Each structure stands twice: as structure tokens, then as C-alpha cells.
């Protein structure tokens, strides 16, 4: 019996575990001497996760023997179909997922680092190879959804890269969450990118690894022995830089919302993959607070049709990271915030909903999974539902979300005096002063 049975489940984050030589047939010949296996798979990383890498590419000798008992045990390169595309359909059969969006492993951080070095031709050549690689891997089964990579370095080339990715067959567009060196990701020069993605009904996705360097090296120079990462090496997350994992997408999305990209492209969806969800409520509240505080002097805020948190509810989806808690402990008591499982039971907006906003819609029954699959982290958000929701929040722009008081009959004679003291409210028309609103 498949691992996921009895309900339709769409994975939200699946990976290819690349091996040396994977990029050769996809990268243009003149760049193969620059982007080599030595660059992508350094010899000094034969530890941690990298020590598990197989020597060469080969399919499982007899994947029919790879059964239910192994699919949830084998990890990384040992997992069925992790690097040999012909084995991936069998893996999907055993997992029982309706679809899997596929992400690279080797190129995520590499592409982000490359974009900080300034060789524009190389940057977009690697992006094209990245997309071709993903489309080729996913060609063996229609349930595999390839992602295309779109750098944010040059305005014209970015739009061209997006069109090429869609032409190749990409089902989502991955962009870096790190800020480009010379402009904001919300620059109007990227409007053709957003327009192309919206027209094609493809989401823009921020994946972990696309945020660049999370913390400066000095943070790890504490005079103590080096700390290994969770794979036993030193090239992945540790507890300190893990805390900064959400900063890049948080800053990128804030710029996109405040500069009205989501307002101008209301059908465009954004996804934040493998970067947690516990940060979302506070971030939404902080954006609403900034919207109110700076509304008077910033014309861009005055032009916004919704509050920032409402754009998040309408157009942003986030996959939570499931964390292990000590036996017998309560997530809310131990950490002060709800676990991903508990949170996603109550809302489908970014896996989590801010109490500061009141979207008037009823979420469908969520999909909840308590463990990770052998190849990728499984999200409790349906991929299909996340990008093509069957219901949208209903917003009343003249109703203040924090003022739900009913006026008693005896207060009706106060209406004329109250109207004289009405004041503008950001994106909400007018609201009454507190002294009048709370009058009993």
C-alpha cells in the first residue's frame, strides 16, 4: 500500500540529488570549462551529506524489489529515484503522491553565489542549464513538475529567461530571495517577469539556498571548537544561521508588497519553500504596523488597495518545517509558538494566519502529514490548491478589521457629530476616532 493513501496529496518540495556530470549535456559548451564538477562538488566536501554521494550515475538494479518498508527509510542518494530519473516513477507509486514539484540541490546555493560575481552571461547560461536539467529529469512522468530558474540581475534577460523557462515546460519559476547587487527585486524593470508568470498561471518560488549568505563568518568565530551541521559536515545549516533562514524571503516579499507588485499583479502567486512558517504571523503584523505608521508620507502605501497582511493571505503560500519536540512537551509552552502541524490545522493562508487580518472565507480541510518522505520534505499544503485556490478572500475596503462594534439605537443621534470627527484610514476609507467608536 502506498505511504499516502485514502486522500489526494500533492508534495510541495521534492529534490533531485545530483551527481557529477549532471550538467554537461545541458550547459552550453563554452561554459563547461568554468562550471565543472570540481566547482559543483568540491573534493574537500567529502564529509557530512557529501560523503554519502555515489561515485557515478546509475539506476537501481531492480527497483521492483524496492518496497514499502524501504521508501520511508532510504534517504538522500540512497533513496529510489533521487538521482536516476527512470526510477522516480516507481518512487512516486510507493509514496502515493499526485504530484511533486522538483527542485535542484546542487545548483540552489551555487546560483545565488554566482549572481554576486557579476558575470551576466555565465549567470543566465547556468540558469538555462538549470531549467533544462529539471525539465529533462521530470520528462519521465507527468506527475513530476519541473521548476525553472530565473536570475534577477538584468531586466531584459530576466524576462527572456522566464519566457524560455515556460517554453521549456517549467511549472514554477524559482527566483533568488537575496537582493540583487544594484536594484531591488521590486524594481519596475521586472514587471515583464511578473506579467509573464501571471499570464502563464505559474507561481514565483523562493527556495532555501536562494537567500545568499545568511550570516557573516564572524558569527561563528566564538573561540570554541567548530560545530558540525546536521549532516555531520560544515557546509550546511547550524543552529545559529538556521535562525536567519527566513530573513531573505521576508525582506524580498516586503519589498514586493510595499512597492505594490502584488497589487499590480493580483493573480500572481508566491511560494516560500523549506524556510519555515513560524515567522509569518509576526511579519504580517509588523507590515501592517509599518503601513499605518508611514501611511501619511508614502504615496505607495496610500495607493495600496489592501493592507499588507491581506496581500499575504491572497497571494503568498509558505511550507512549514516540522520540528521535533521533547517527549511530553507542549510546542506552545516550550517555544511560544504553535508547531507547523497544529498551525496548519487552522488555516491555509501561508500555512498560518495573522490575527491582525480577518479574511472572510472558510478554509478547506487541510492535508496533514506527520513524517518526511525519503526524498523530500512533505508539506501539509496541497501544491495544486496553493497555487490555484478555489476560493478567494472577500474584502470590504470600507470596513476596518479592528472595529467590529455595533452601534446601539441610542447612539444613532450621535452620527452627525461622529461624522465631523471622521478621519482617513489607510486603505479603508474612513473610521471613527476611538472615543466615538468605543462609546457605549
Image (tube, rainbow, N blue to C red):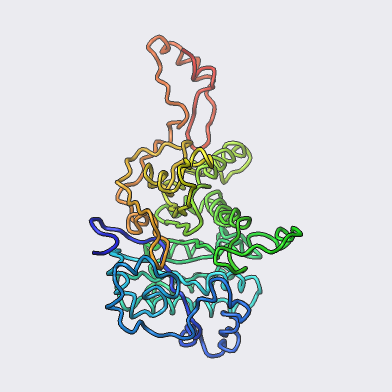
Quadrant occupied by the N terminus: bottom left
Q: Quadrant of residue 198?
A: bottom left
Provide residue 432's location: percent of width, then percent of height: 50, 23
Please state which of residues 65 and 172 is positioned toward the viewer in this rendering.
65
Q: Residue lying farthest front?
A: 327
Provide residue 180's location: percent of width, then percent of height: 62, 64
Q: Is residue 198 visible?
A: no
The number of numbered discs placed on residues in the rendered structure image is 0
Provide residue 367's location: percent of width, then percent of height: 32, 52
In the displayed structure, does residue 85 sit left or right of residue 218?
Answer: left
In the displayed structure, does residue 151 sit left or right of residue 164?
Answer: right
Which residue occupies 48% across, 77% down?
130
Which residue occupies 54% across, 67% down?
231
Please tell me whether residue 203 is drawn above or below residue 148 in the rendered image: above
Please tell me whether residue 406 is drawn above or below residue 223 in the rendered image: above
Please state which of residues 344 and 254 is positioned toward the viewer in this rendering.
344
Which residue occupies 55% across, 59% down?
188
Q: Is residue 64 visible?
A: yes
Q: Residue lying farthest right?
A: 223
Please tell me whether residue 312 is drawn above or below residue 63 in the rendered image: above
Provide residue 339's location: percent of width, then percent of height: 46, 46
Please state which of residues 35 and 62 is positioned toward the viewer in this rendering.
62
Amino acid at each position: 500500500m502506498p505511504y499516502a493513501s485514502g486522500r489526494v496529496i500533492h508534495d510541495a518540495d521534492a529534490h533531485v540529488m545530483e551527481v557529477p556530470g549532471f550538467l554537461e549535456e545541458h550547459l552550453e559548451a563554452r561554459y563547461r570549462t568554468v562550471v565543472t564538477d570540481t566547482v559543483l562538488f568540491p573534493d574537500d566536501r567529502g564529509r557530512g551529506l557529501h560523503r554519502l554521494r555515489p561515485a557515478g550515475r546509475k539506476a537501481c538494479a531492480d527497483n521492483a524489489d524496492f518496497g514499502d518498508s524501504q521508501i520511508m527509510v532510504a534517504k538522500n542518494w540512497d533513496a529510489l529515484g533521487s538521482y536516476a530519473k527512470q526510477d522516480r516513477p516507481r518512487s512516486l507509486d510507493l509514496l502515493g503522491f499526485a504530484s511533486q514539484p522538483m527542485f535542484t540541490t546542487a545548483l540552489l546555493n551555487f546560483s545565488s553565489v554566482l549572481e554576486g560575481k557579476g558575470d551576466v552571461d555565465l549567470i543566465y547560461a547556468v540558469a538555462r542549464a538549470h531549467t533544462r536539467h529539471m525539465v529533462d529529469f521530470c520528462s519521465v512522468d507527468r506527475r513530476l513538475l519541473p521548476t525553472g530558474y530565473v536570475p534577477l540581475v538584468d531586466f531584459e534577460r530576466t524576462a527572456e529567461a522566464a519566457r524560455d523557462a515556460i517554453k521549456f515546460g517549467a511549472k514554477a519559476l524559482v527566483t533568488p530571495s537575496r537582493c540583487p547587487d544594484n536594484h531591488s527585486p521590486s524594481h519596475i524593470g521586472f514587471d515583464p517577469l511578473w506579467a509573464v508568470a501571471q499570464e502563464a498561471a505559474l507561481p514565483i518560488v523562493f527556495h532555501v539556498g536562494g537567500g545568499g549568505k545568511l550570516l557573516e563568518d564572524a558569527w561563528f568565530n566564538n573561540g570554541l571548537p567548530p560545530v558540525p551541521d546536521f549532516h555531520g559536515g560544515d557546509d550546511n545549516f547550524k543552529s545559529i544561521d538556521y535562525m536567519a533562514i527566513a530573513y531573505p524571503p521576508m525582506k524580498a516579499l516586503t519589498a514586493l508588497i510595499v512597492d505594490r507588485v502584488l497589487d499590480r499583479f493580483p493573480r500572481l502567486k508566491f511560494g516560500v519553500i523549506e524556510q519555515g512558517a513560524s515567522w509569518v504571523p509576526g511579519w504580517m503584523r509588523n507590515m501592517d504596523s509599518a503601513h499605518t505608521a508611514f501611511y501619511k508620507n508614502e504615496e505607495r502605501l496610500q495607493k495600496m488597495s489592501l493592507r499588507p497582511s491581506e496581500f499575504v493571505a491572497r497571494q503568498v503560500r509558505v511550507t512549514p518545517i516540522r520540528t521535533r519536540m521533547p517527549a511530553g512537551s507542549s510546542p506552545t509552552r516550550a517555544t511560544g509558538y504553535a508547531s507547523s502541524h497544529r498551525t496548519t490545522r487552522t488555516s491555509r493562508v501561508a500555512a498560518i494566519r495573522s490575527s491582525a487580518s480577518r479574511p472572510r472565507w472558510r478554509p478547506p480541510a487541510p492535508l496533514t502529514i506527520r513524517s518526511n518522505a525519503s526524498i523530500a520534505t512533505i508539506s501539509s499544503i496541497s501544491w495544486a490548491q496553493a497555487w490555484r485556490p478555489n476560493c478567494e478572500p472577500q474584502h470590504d475596503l470600507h470596513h476596518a478589521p479592528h472595529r467590529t462594534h455595533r452601534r446601539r439605537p441610542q447612539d444613532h443621534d450621535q452620527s452627525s457629530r461622529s461624522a465631523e470627527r471622521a478621519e482617513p484610514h489607510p486603505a479603508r476609507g474612513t473610521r471613527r476616532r476611538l472615543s466615538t467608536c468605543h462609546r457605549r
